[in-house]
Image (tube, grey):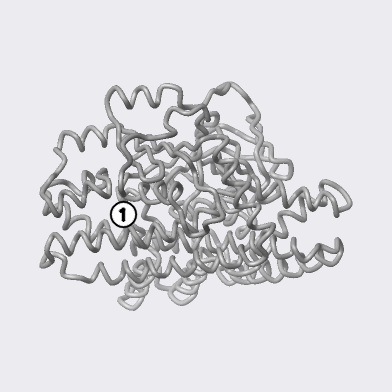
Amino acid sequence: MPKSPTPKFLQDKDPWLLAEEIPDSDVFFFQIPMSAFCSDTSYPFLKNYSKVLTHYKKFHMDFYLGEKDSFLVGESVLKALLTRPNFGKNLNENILKWSYVLINFSKKTSKLPLQKYSNKHLWELYAEQDKIHTKLYTYGWLPVAVDMFHNNFTKNLKSYLYSVCDSKQDAENAFIVLTTPSQKTIVAQEREDFLNIYNKYKKSLKKPDEEFKTALKIHSAKWGHLGYIYAGNVKPFGPEHYLKELQDLASSGISANGILKKERAQLKSAKNKQAAIYKKYNISKQYRNLFTTAQGFALTKLVRRHAQLFCLYSMHTSLLPEIAKRLNRTRYQVQFMLYGEVKEALLRGKILSKKDLQNRFKECVLYTEKDFEAIYTGSTLKKLTKNLGRIFDKNQKELIGQTAQPGYAKGVVKLILRAKDIHKMNKGDILVSIATDPDIVPAMKLAGAIVTEQGGITSHAAIVSRELGIPCVIGTKIATKILKDGDLVEVDANKGIVKKL
């Protein structure tokens, strides 16, 4: 990325808004969306972000947007959805298209004899991955931008429903029905493959034969990357993970065929309920289109995540280790280098010192604007992060969020941030997380209710909780800061309220 001499907006008066807190993150992956946010040219009629600040402490990342700036970006996307009838459809089509372009590139690259390639050739592959992945993000981020931080899309859709429904509660119920996908998500596709393996080999669970072991290996190769998160500091789901999950299913006494039948019935029911609401309230053509777009956002969000995790696993096990070897650095150190720094190192031998890279890993800030990016450590880091963070009452007993899936549950809190936490989860526990990701879906299946800090109709928790039929409250902002393992809580997902008992 070409660099301007100095950043333009770093010291402006727009206060920082915490956008997301993401465990297990690195610069290699997240410099891609950050640059896309500020330099996106896929739809020239949309506003780009003026500034993005990303704060790392080892692999733990918080990223911040300008509060006013992020609202205006959301309004820009919302305006396009309202005034351009084909925009939402085109957006979803492009997310799917570029997701599979990224997957195909990753498959091809992982099979190349990279040890025989020149530094120039390695750089060309690195740059191509960055180009494709950035293009995917110029589309894939927009459904998040329009709803996650200021609920621009949600507020507009609900406002319309308030104007046509019989009551506010009817409108809230209609909103959930009309934004729930009536097509199978990619998470459901994995689950169906998994349950088909269970039905075929359930008699061999204690002593798997070679055919069963092969089926588990094939399933792991196809889906195991869903357990592999951004920084690559955990292993993907392997055959042993899926075998244990199959054994746990067998011990639960739950029918696999019953799960499949229930999921098929839910999809059919969703279509019927949507058709009934459209007819009852005479939903306009414009808003039918918008609700269809919202459902599409939920479907394509999961495909995008699937593609990105597949790509990251491929890059971490092929291209990045070879680059690290050439530079005499660890793979994790390469993951804290910027795009331009990798280019300089491979093509011109200008390699950052191990000490500098270790300091970045310990703590750093990545700041991005259009045509500008820089990493800061030391005194500049302290100055930039001085006023970041959230102020809240640690003793509060009630949290308020948004209803993602209605229902009620009471149970014991289990903080589940990543797959390594799943062992804590028992059937009926209340899963509390910053935001759910594909790696903790096995825990979500056991939950009596799900509570997250982050939200939006395209959030992973909202999509999967509806698919599983589990009560879910999203967007509480501070759930993992207030609640701890062992707390007894009441989750009224009909009202979006979580009470500590």
Whether residue 176 sits left or right of residue 131 in the image: it is: right
Type of amino acid under label 1: Lys
- Give whichever of 1, 359 is nearer the camera: 1
- Residue that numbered label 1 is attached to: 235
Image location (x, y in percent) of residue 170 = 82, 51
Q: Residues within 10 Å of mark 1 (few under 14, many from 20)?
A: few
Q: Secondary structure at mark 1?
A: loop
Which image quarter: residue 210? bottom left
Q: Residue at x 22, y 55 (%)?
A: 320
Give the residue at the far front of this rendering. Answer: 5
Whether residue 160 sits left or right of residue 334 in the image: it is: right
- Give whichever of 297, 477 is nearer the camera: 297
Which image quarter: residue 22? top left
Image quarter of the C terminus: top right
In this rendering, is residue 64 above or below 288? above
Image location (x, y in percent) of residue 142 = 54, 54
Number of numbered callouts drawn: 1
Q: Residue at x 68, y 46 (%)?
A: 403
Image location (x, y in percent) of residue 352 = 16, 40
In this rendering, is residue 359 above or below 265? above
Q: Residue at x 64, y 32 (%)?
A: 399
Image location (x, y in percent) of residue 106 = 31, 66
- Give whichever of 350, 378 is nearer the camera: 350
